[in-house]
Image (cartoon, rainbow, N blue to C red):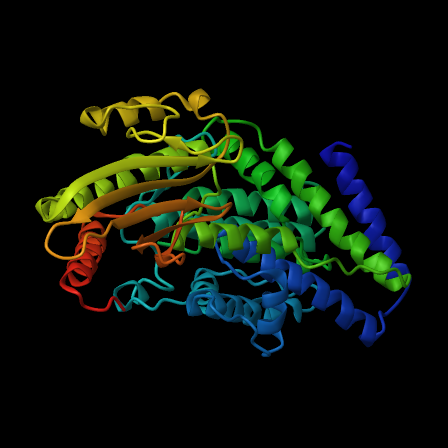
Amino acid sequence: MSFIEKLQEIDSLQAAIQERGPIPVSLLNKINYKLRLEWNYTSNSMEGNSLTKRETRTVMVNNLEVNGKPIKDVMEIRSHDKVITTIMKMGKGELNISESRIKEIHKGIMYEEDAEKLKYVGQWKSTDNYMLNFDGERYDFTPHAEVPERMHELVNWINSEKEKIERSKKDAAHPALLAFKFQIDYLTIHPFYDGNGRTARILSNLILISYGFPPLYIKEDEKQSYYRYLTDIQSGGGEPDLFYEFMAGLLLRSLQITIDTLDGRDVEEEDDIDKEIALFKRSLDKDKERTEIYNWDSVSKIITESGIPLFQKLKTKLSQFDELFHLNENRIIFNTDKSPSYDLLQRHGGYMVSTALFPESLRNWLSNPMELNGHIISFGMEYLFKGYKFAQPYDLPVFMRFSFEEYTYSISYMIQNNDQEDYFGDYRYDQLIDSGEINNIVNEITKMVLNFIKGDKIE
């Protein structure tokens, strides 16, 4: 349907509404509330406001349920609703757009916590502004020095067109066309430091309402088309016909909502759960680290960057006790779910790696996961002291390991065979053990070994 055809449909629907006579107050309130909610929610959402439709509704009825949302977002919805509620109470023919009124509307919708920015509210911009358009290209708006003159011309133009309609002149434009063209020209000027999109849509709807039309709104899945059409006009020098046609379709929707309500059809929509989900995921990306589940890359990184440094440091510390015993042995053990343990540092056979080559040979081995034959359950180190020299001989095994579960891994240890492992803690797969924590773990185990040898009780 072309723009001209949509204008004809707009007039037809408006006539059908008017033929029904005065709208009952209860239905009028329902229509206005629906359109007011959509207008508040969608226009602010387009500018980055984080409130969902449900939260927008609670602000509108002063029953705040917006825990965790910025106060600026709440206040912007509240201020915007106050302005558009006043506009929606206008009667037909009450079009009054002036430079002072535009500034008052800007004051009404803006909420600034920054005192420096607050002084620019309701004032034409004092510096030039620009945007990166839909194609990522820079588009410069009207220079700030030219804004007073350009806004004066725009206001004079809309009031001149209003007069043509009042006098039923042949060259009078359709009110919808005036609303849409005004929005393009206003956005090209971009007269304020911020809030231009919201004020443009308010002023465009103000024109529609003054001629008896309902306000229109732009939904989440429509805003890309809206921006694309504006980009084509502003940056590409395109004709505005497609933009007019798009906007006319939105006005037809608002008219249809009015008719559906009058006919008793349900016009309520579910809250924008898609936006709520998207905002939640965005908050996780911004404020929280992502977690990983068990995968080869994560396990290999933990072994290489946390496990090997920890075992190397522990081996060096424990070697200070070697001369107190007749023998010592140490080994690295991998346990998988599809095979017996791999003994990597020579003792019980299995996959043999020379102690002298640790950890280089281990790193090389890890670079070929096909060798593992299955899912790694644990990665451990045993340091075995054999035959204490200075009393009744005894063996002292010191065992430490990383155990890998689906969502977390843990670090545990055992000194002397007591059939019970003690834990240092559970960690996410995106958490590596840094050098400071490695030192703490190694020193704690070394101290417990010393206390055991000295005959002290290990707690």
Please identify the quarter of the rendering in which residue 188 is found: top left
- 31 versus 203 height, above or below: below
Residue 163 visible somewhere in the drawing: no
Residue 331 visible somewhere in the drawing: yes
Residue lying at 31% horizontally and 31% vertically, measured from the top left: 347
The answer to which of 348 and 97 lies nearer the viewer is 348
- Residue 210 position in % (x across, y down): 66, 61
Please identify the quarter of the rendering in which residue 129 is found: top left
Q: Quadrant of the N terminus?
A: top right
Q: Work out which residue is located at the far bottom of the displayed protein and give it.
A: 62
The answer to which of 70 and 92 lies nearer the viewer is 70
- 416 versus 371 height, above or below: below
- Numbered marks: total: 0
**Quick check: 335 left or right of 411?**
right
Residue lying at 63% horizontally and 65% vertically, measured from the top left: 54
Q: Work out which residue is located at the far front of the displayed protein and give it.
A: 392
- Residue 122 position in % (x across, y down): 38, 64
Please identify the quarter of the rendering in which residue 9 is found: top right
Q: Quadrant of the C terminus?
A: bottom left
The answer to which of 322 and 84 lies nearer the viewer is 322
Residue lying at 54% horizontally and 27% vertically, measured from the top left: 238
- Residue 258 position in % (x across, y down): 80, 59
- Residue 344 position in % (x across, y down): 32, 29
The answer to which of 353 and 65 lies nearer the viewer is 353
**Quick check: 263 left or right of 106?**
right
